[in-house]
Image (cartoon, rainbow, N blue to C red):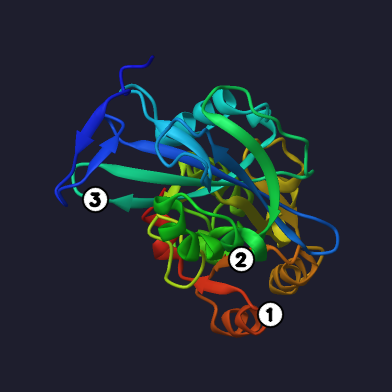
Amino acid sequence: MGDGDGWAGCELGHTHWGRFGAAGLLAYHRDPGGQLWILLQQRAWWGIGGGTWGMFGGALHSHEDVVSGALRETSEECTLDTEVVAVHGTSVEDHGGWSYTSVMGSLSERLPVDPASRETRRAEWVRAEEVTERRLFEPFARSWPRLQDAMRRLVLVVDAANVVGARADGWWKDRAGANARLRDDLKALGGGVQGLPGGVVPFDRCFPEVVLVVEGAARRVADEPSDGVKVVAAPGSGDDRIVDLLRQDRPDTAHLVVTADRELRARCEAAGAAVTGPRWLLDRL
């Protein structure tokens, strides 16, 4: 048992399992035909909500973050190798003094998953449109309508020339150096981003794939090694390359482009992307 195992109250007058809150993993896979599959757990008959279906999860330990806790609980309750899960974001249900965090993560394959503890009766991949046909665990049933819109990966596309121009760090003296500094600063986003503009993806905290598009004298930055940030060199116009990226990406992807260029904004929005200005990004670096 961990130090989080135990009952806790909340400001709404409910009693919950998990002294320090709880978290679960909503794992999903989109197959080549576009079908969305959800990994569900049928809870053991003897436990809370016995026989109902929901996501894998449980009580958090005092020392762990919500993502680590959700992945740990999942690995304890089923045979899924959680190291292959790409975590995209979290959604919090706050009861005041106690909260449950749903962690959204995708898998590139619909791997076979079996029970791994007495808490799990069955594990099964279910078509998204058939989830509500199951007898759902009441808290999961309540959150499912909200979580359906969160099963997308977020790609943050940064217009390097525009963002660098918004920073007072001497970019006009060394454009490549300024772009390299921005690239290195963007690595901080790997720890999670909060405060997404409305209408992008309903995450309280997201872990975006970051793409930095460089052009002109800064193109050589794309040849340098970089962890956590993908640097794309535009052969010509950076604006054209950004729009091309939006059109070529997977259909389960939400894009947020960072630029203050009005013409590029209009082109990105026409391609279905959301757009925000450099200040939003710089406030998070």
- Is the C-beta separation of discs 2 and 1 under 8 Å? yes
The residue where tag 2 is placed is 255
Of all residues, the one furthest to the right in this rendering is: 32
The residues bearing labels 3 and 2 have C-alpha atoms spaced at a distance of 31 Å
Residue 197 pos. (x, y %): 43, 68
Mark 2 vs 1, N-terminal side: 2
Q: Between 219 and 54, which is closer to the camera in this rendering? A: 54
Residue 41 pos. (x, y %): 58, 40
Quick one: SS at disc 2? strand
- At label 3, which amino acid type do we have? His
Residue drawn at the location 71% of the way across and 47% of the way down:
125
The residues bearing labels 3 and 1 have C-alpha atoms spaced at a distance of 38 Å
- At label 2, which amino acid type do we have? His
Residue drawn at the location 77% of the way across and 45% of the way down:
108
Quick one: SS at disc 1? loop
Mark 3 vs 2, N-terminal side: 3
Residue 156 pos. (x, y %): 58, 58
The residue where tag 1 is placed is 271
Residue 159 visible:
no
Of all residues, the one furthest to the top in this rendering is: 1
In the picture, measured across the screen, residue 76 lies left or right of residue 125, that is: left
- At label 1, which amino acid type do we have? Ala
Q: Between 135 and 176, which is closer to the camera in this rendering? A: 135
